[in-house]
Amino acid sequence: MKTSVLITGPESSCTRMVTQIVCSMRFIGSSGHLQVLDKYIGKSPIVSAEYVYRQSVPHGGRLPDYKKIRKYFKNNNMDLRTIVVLRNHIPNMISKVERGHTENKNVNKKLSDEISYIFKNSIYIEPFIVLSASALMLDVDSGIFEIERFLEKKFTGKKSFIFNSDKKRYEDVHGS
């Protein structure tokens, strides 16, 4: 049975960066906002391969239907593993506002609601690991090791795209 990977997390939690890491482990997919599998989930079968599918919460203005996603991969005879990406609260909130995902006055509630949604639906995304993007940015090798161990695959790409974007967010708050 082929293994595919669902990457999910609140908006601005670095799901794109984690997806790029997984793509470097020979999974088919994209770290971009447009996800090829969006047009197939729940509709038509896909070629049996190992895919990575990124769904931020929300994704394209809607909450991901984890039950439908799980069923789709199961119906296509694929094992699905999930990486839930979380980021330290302050840099995540600042990034959400900077990127226009929400207004400053609503950001804490919106982020909390997104995290709650993921875990209220966790039965549909098992097995999963929770990966701290903030920790990954500070210790790239250990973060990649967590992913490798969970997916039972080796990272074969370059690490140059992984950088500590949290540092800037904290500097913005501290003024240093």
Image (cartoon, rainbow, N blue to C red):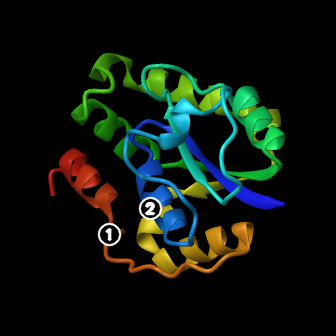
Dividing the picture into quadrants, the one containing residue 105 is top left
In the image shown, does 10 or 155 lie closer to the viewer?
Answer: 155
**On the rendered image, what quadrant is the N terminus found in?**
bottom right
Tell me the distance, in whole angstroms, between the alpha carbons under discs 1 and 2: 9 Å
Dividing the picture into quadrants, the one containing residue 176 is bottom left
User: In the displayed structure, does residue 157 sit left or right of residue 118?
Assistant: left
In the image shown, does 164 or 60 lie closer to the viewer?
Answer: 60
As displayed, is residue 48 above or below residue 103? below
What residue sits 54% from the left and 64% below the top? 22
SS for callout 2: helix
How far across and how far down the image is residue 9, in percent?
54, 41
Mark 2, Cα crowd under 10 Å, few <14 / some 14-19 / many 20+, is many
Residue type at mark 1 is Phe
As displayed, is residue 77 above or below residue 164? above
Residue type at mark 2 is Gln
In the image shown, does 28 or 140 lie closer to the viewer?
Answer: 28
Precedes in sequence: disc 1 or disc 2: 2
Q: How many marks?
A: 2
SS for callout 1: loop
User: In the displayed structure, does residue 141 sit left or right of residue 146?
Assistant: left
Mark 1, Cα crowd under 10 Å, few <14 / some 14-19 / many 20+, is few
Which residue position is annotated with label 1?
A: 161
Please identify, in this view, whether the residue under mark 1 or under mark 2 is nearer the observer: 2
Q: Are marks 1 and 2 in contact (CB under 8 Å)?
A: yes
Which residue position is annotated with label 2?
A: 20
How far across and how far down the image is residue 158, in percent?
39, 80
What residue sits 55% from the left and 57% below the top? 132
How far across and how far down the image is residue 58, in percent?
49, 26
User: In the displayed structure, does residue 143 sit left or right of residue 169?
Assistant: right
Q: Where residue 75 is drawn, which disc sits there?
A: none
How far across and how far down the image is residue 100, in percent?
25, 27
